[in-house]
Image (cartoon, grey):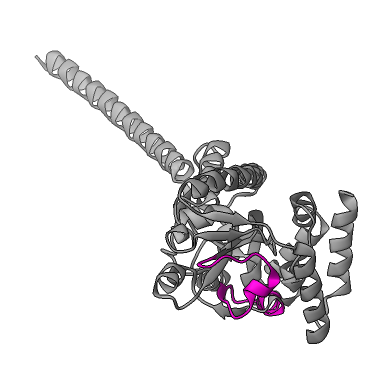
Amino acid sequence: MKKLLALFMASAMMLSLVACSSSSSSATSTSSSSSSSSSTTEVADPIVLKMGFNDPDTSPYVQGGQKIAELVAEATDGQIQIEVYSSGALGDERAMVEMAMDGSLDIATCANSVMTNFIPEMGILDQAYLWKNADEAHAAVDGELGELVKEEARALGMEVIGFLESGFRNTFSTEPILSMEDYSGVTIRVMENAYHQAAFESFGAMPIVMSYNDVFTALQQGTIDACENATANCLNSGYYEVTKHVTNSSHAFVYILMCMSESAWNKIPEELQEPFMAAVQEGVEYERALLVQSNEEATVELMELGVEFHDIDVAELQAAYQAKVAEKGFTFDSEWEDAVQAAIASVA
C-alpha cells in the first residue's frame, strides 16, 4: 500500500513539473509573439502627411499633388502617405507657408510670388518675361537656382521638395484686350507681389491684391475687370462665366513650390528619403506635362463655351515692363542673377 502511495505521489509530481514546463513555454511564446506584433505595428503604422492647395480639385496642381501622393505611397510600400486638401481648406497660400514654418502643417504649396515675401531674393523669378520658354524655367529650378531657393527655405524651417508649376500666365477679362492701350484703367486681380503689380502698372492697368478664393465673386460683382492665371484655370475656376476674353499675354511664369516643414521632413527615416524624393520628382514631371495638356484642352473647351482668345504685341509689353523696372530701381542678388543666366545658357 505504501509502495502504491509513493508511486502515485511520484507520478503526480512529474505531471506537475510537465505542466509547469508547458506553462512557462507558452508564456515565452506569447511574449515573443507580442514583441513581434509590436514591431510589426511600428513598421505598419504609416507616416501620414497633410498637403494643402489653394486651388480646386480640377486644377492640374491638385491633380499633380494627388499623383505625388499615389507615387509616394507606392515607392515607400505605404509607409508614407500624403493626404491632399484642396480649395484652401487648410488656409490660403501665405497662411499655409506660415503654418509649415512653425510646423503646424506638413506640406504647404504656394506660388513663388508668395514665397518672395519670405525669401526676397526670389523676386528675380517674379519678373515679367524672364523666360522665353518652359525649358529655361525648368532648367532654373531643377538646377543651381533651385538649390539657392532650397537653401534659403531651410533657414526658415522648411524643405522645398519639389517645384510644381502654374506655367505661363495669361489675362482673363470681361472686355477684349487687344493692345497695351486696352489695359488702361482695367482693374485686375494679382497676387501679393511687387513685381507682378509693377508689370500691370507698366501696361496701364490697375492691379489689385486679392485672395484667390474671392476672385470669382469680385468678377461677378464688377469689383474687378480682369484676373490672370494659367489658361486651364479660366475653365477650372469658372472664370469663363464672366470673363469672355483671354489675352495671350504670357507675362509671367509661375512655379508652385512644395514646402515641407522641418518637423515633417525629420519624420521620414533616412532609408526612405531617397525613394520619397524620387517619387515626388516623378509626380512633378507628371504635373508639368498635365498642365500643358490641360491648357490645350481648356483652350478648345473655352472656345466652345464662347470665350474669345486674342494675341497681343508681347514685345511692347516687355519694353513697358523694363521701363518700369528702371523707374522703380529693382535690383537682384548677383549670385541669383548668375543662376538665371546659367539656366538660360544651358538650353540655348
Residue 122 coordinates in the image, percent (x, y): 73, 70
Residue 186: in magenta span: yes
Bounds of the magenta span?
173-202
Q: Above or below — where is 218 with respect to 71?
A: below
| Residue 74 appears in the picture as rendered | yes
- Residue 90: name its quadrant: bottom left
Closer to the camera, 294 or 147? 294
Residue 81: in magenta span: no
Closer to the camera, 298 or 102? 298
| Residue 261 appears in the picture as rendered | no
Q: Is residue 240 left or right of residue 348?
A: left
Residue at the image point whose x is 86% and y is 56% from the top: 344
Residue 26 coordinates in the image, percent (x, y): 32, 30
Q: Is residue 43 left or right of residue 317?
A: left
Residue 165 coordinates in the image, percent (x, y): 63, 55
Residue 323 coordinates in the image, percent (x, y): 81, 79
Residue at the image point whose x is 69% and y is 64% from the top: 252
Residue at the image point whose x is 49% and y is 76% from the top: 224
Closer to the camera, 329 or 308? 308
